[in-house]
Amino acid sequence: MEEHTAEREAMLEYVEQFAGILTSSGMQRMAARVFTYILVDDEETYTAAEIAEGLSISLAAVSGAVRELLAAGLVFKTRRPSTRADVYRLNEEDIWGSIMLDRSGFLDRYRDTALIGIDSLPAGPGRDRLVQTAAFMEFIKVEMRLMHEHWNERRLELSAAYEARRRDAGASG
């Protein structure tokens, strides 16, 4: 493995820092590291071997992490043109909107499972809580769709504002 430059070392330290936040939010440690690496490194797609080399971890560790990230919809698997290699990538167009706001599949499963309970349980507090669960999931699904639309309207504007702040801070510092 090649020696890391100071810039590369700083990036890998940041990967650990950001992954720590994801881990404290409930994500498995290796999945958090792999996700953050794909998020902050400059390549657009990664093979499992490239991820393993970049993070100095085993292919088995990458395999488990990628499986979790795929299941959660945090990364996508495609093929590299003219090869048979599977590659992993983020939704570059809308990374966080797709991660945080495209959860209708999960919400539908919660709602549908609550509906099964509503149909099978006798009237009472437990069934009432399932009615509230189903109603909440339906409400959240609609609100998240509206929020995603609003985010899409504001995304470029807000991103440009962060870039302008960064440039201004660099010019004055």
Image (cartoon, rainbow, N blue to C red):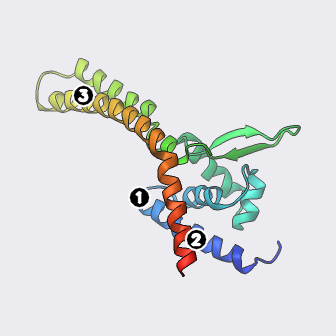
Across and down, in percent, residue 143 comes to: 33, 34
Q: Nearer the N terminus, badge 1 or badge 2?
A: 2
Q: Is residue 96 visible?
A: no
At mark 1, the secondary structure is: loop
Q: CA distance from mark 1 to mark 2?
A: 17 Å
The residue mark sitting in front, 3 or 2, is 2
- Spot the residue most to the right: 82
- Tell me the quarter of the picture where residue 131 sits: top left
Q: Residue at x 62, y 46 (%)?
A: 90
Q: Is residue 166 visible?
A: yes
At mark 3, the secondary structure is: helix
Q: Residue at x 88, y 37 (%)?
A: 82
Residue 51 in the figure: left or right of residue 139: right
Across and down, in percent, residue 120 comes to: 24, 19
Amino acid on which the number 2 mark rests in the picture: Tyr
Q: Nearer the N terminus, badge 3 or badge 2?
A: 2
Q: Residue at x 67, y 55 (%)?
A: 62
Q: Residues within 10 Å of mark 2 (few under 14, many from 20)?
A: some
* Residue placed under numbered mark 3 in the picture: 135
Q: Nearer the N terminus, badge 1 or badge 3?
A: 1
The residue lying toward the viewer, choosing from 46 and 63, is 46
Are the two marked residues, 1 and 3, in contact with CB atoms closer than 8 angstroms? no
Amino acid on which the number 1 mark rests in the picture: Ser
Residue 130 in the figure: left or right of residue 45: left
Res. 35 mark: none
* Residue placed under numbered mark 1 in the picture: 25
Q: Is residue 32 above or below residue 168?
A: above
